[in-house]
Amino acid sequence: MSDHGRQSITDKISAAVKPDSSKTTTEHFGDKIKGKSDNAAATMEPRNEKSYTQKLGDKLTGNSHSERH
């Protein structure tokens, strides 16, 4: 199972739980870039090749592109 180009579930959770008011401009920019990159990777990677944690992460984050078969 390949997770190439995907953001780890722990990185997603860490970014989500830290309040925006506590983030630096660099962190905001990084979160945005990582999110777009992760969405693109989720779109390109067939669901049957995703790890359990990536499927769970896609479901929890509402990644609308996560259902490619």
Image (cartoon, helix red, strand yellow):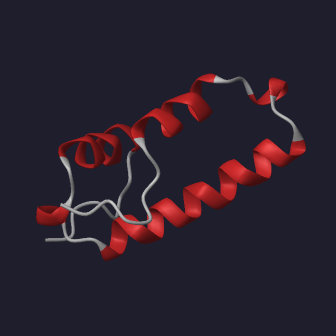
**Left or right: residue 49 compared with residue 14:** left
Height in image: 5 above or below 20?
below
Residue at image point 20% right, 51% down:
51
Residue 56 lies in what quarter of the image? top left
Residue 44 lies in what quarter of the image? bottom left
Q: Position of residue 54 (x, y in %)?
A: 29, 48
Residue farthest along the bottom direction in this orientation? 44
Residue at image point 20% right, 71% down:
46
**Left or right: residue 32 compared with residue 5:** right
Q: How many marks?
A: 0
Height in image: 16 above or below 34?
above
Residue at image point 50% right, 30% down:
13
**Left or right: residue 40 compared with residue 25:** left
Height in image: 45 above or below 35?
below
Residue at image point 54% right, 66% down:
37
Q: Position of residue 16 (x, y in %)?
A: 58, 31
Q: Position of residue 45 (x, y in %)?
A: 28, 71
Q: Quadrant of the N terminus?
A: bottom left
Height in image: 10 above or below 57?
above
Q: Quadrant of the C terminus?
A: bottom left
**Left or right: residue 12 compared with residue 6:** right
Q: Position of residue 15 (x, y in %)?
A: 61, 34
| 32 or 3, nearer to the observer | 3
